[in-house]
Image (cartoon, grey):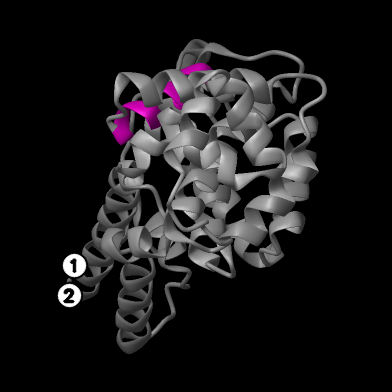
Amino acid sequence: MAWWGKVVGGALGFVLGGPLGALLGGVLGHKLDKGMASLQGTEEMDPGDRERVQTAFFTATFSVLGHMAKADGRVSPREIALAEAVMQRMDLSPDLRATAIQLFNRGKADDFDLDGVLTQFRRECHRRVTLLQMFLEIQIQAAYADGVPAPAEQRILGHIREQLGIPEFLFRRMEQLAGMQWEYAGGGAGAGGRPSAPRGPTLEQAYELLGLSPQASDAEVKRAYRRLMSQHHPDKLVSKGLPEEMMKLASQKTHEIRQAYEMITAARKV
């Protein structure tokens, strides 16, 4: 049975256990019995197993998205739209989409166990740092869905960073990029307070995306580009446990990296 079939069938919710398994089990309900039955005669999956990591990533992503959306006391239309956009880019099956929506709603509950979810998610990822970073990027983008994050959202983002062990300098760069992307997508106010038209990425943003300053040498630019492309290659991420349905998100990231590199190299030839 494929990963998504095991999720919908309940099997992976059962073997995952912990806060993430409880979340998924609460969503799947009676399907857990079917999932447990499907495990008869199969080897138990250990922490770090690819399918188990995929389930942890999927469950944590959408439940924490819901928690993040509720952080400032209300769920805005833009935050809902961002969650729906993530689902759309993943091209989820109807069953998985319904599961993602229910996880999002459970994340909005007052008793959502954020620390438990993050602690287990980090443990399940087994030092797969790129997966942890991609998870945080999704949450940061959600926080910036309707502009500069509210103080409550900023506190939660900082807490997520600490729980996942992501360096603060990297977190700040992710935040800066999210803010710039929101502005360049037309999120900033134009004349009369109306949303401004999308302006597209700038050379400054391109350097920021590669983690470089304009003073970087050509060799440094090329090294940064190759390193980031290697880290975010969709096939490599899937092999580490990224759900295949999230390959489109990874592909978008590599497209942005390639676009930034091409913009920088073109500017340097002028």
Q: Quadrant of residue 86?
A: top left
Q: Which residue is mark 2?
A: 269
Coordinates of residue 18 in the picture (x, y in percent): 71, 44
Asked whether, in this view, residue 239 is left or right of residue 128, the answer is left
Q: Residues within 10 Å of mark 1 (few under 14, many from 20)?
A: few
Q: Quadrant of residue 186?
A: top left
Q: What residue appears at the point 50 percent right and 58 percent down from the top-left corner?
A: 131
Q: Quadrant of residue 162?
A: bottom right
Q: Secondary structure at mark 2?
A: helix
Which stretch did the figure color magenta? 80-90
Coordinates of residue 38 in the picture (x, y in percent): 42, 38
The mark found on residue 24 in the picture is: none
The disc labelled 2 sits on which kind of residue?
Lys
Q: Residue 89 lies in magenta, yes or no? A: yes
Above-or-below relation of 171 to 199: below
Q: Which residue is mark 1?
A: 266
Q: Is residue 188 visible?
A: no
Above-or-below relation of 154 to 270: above
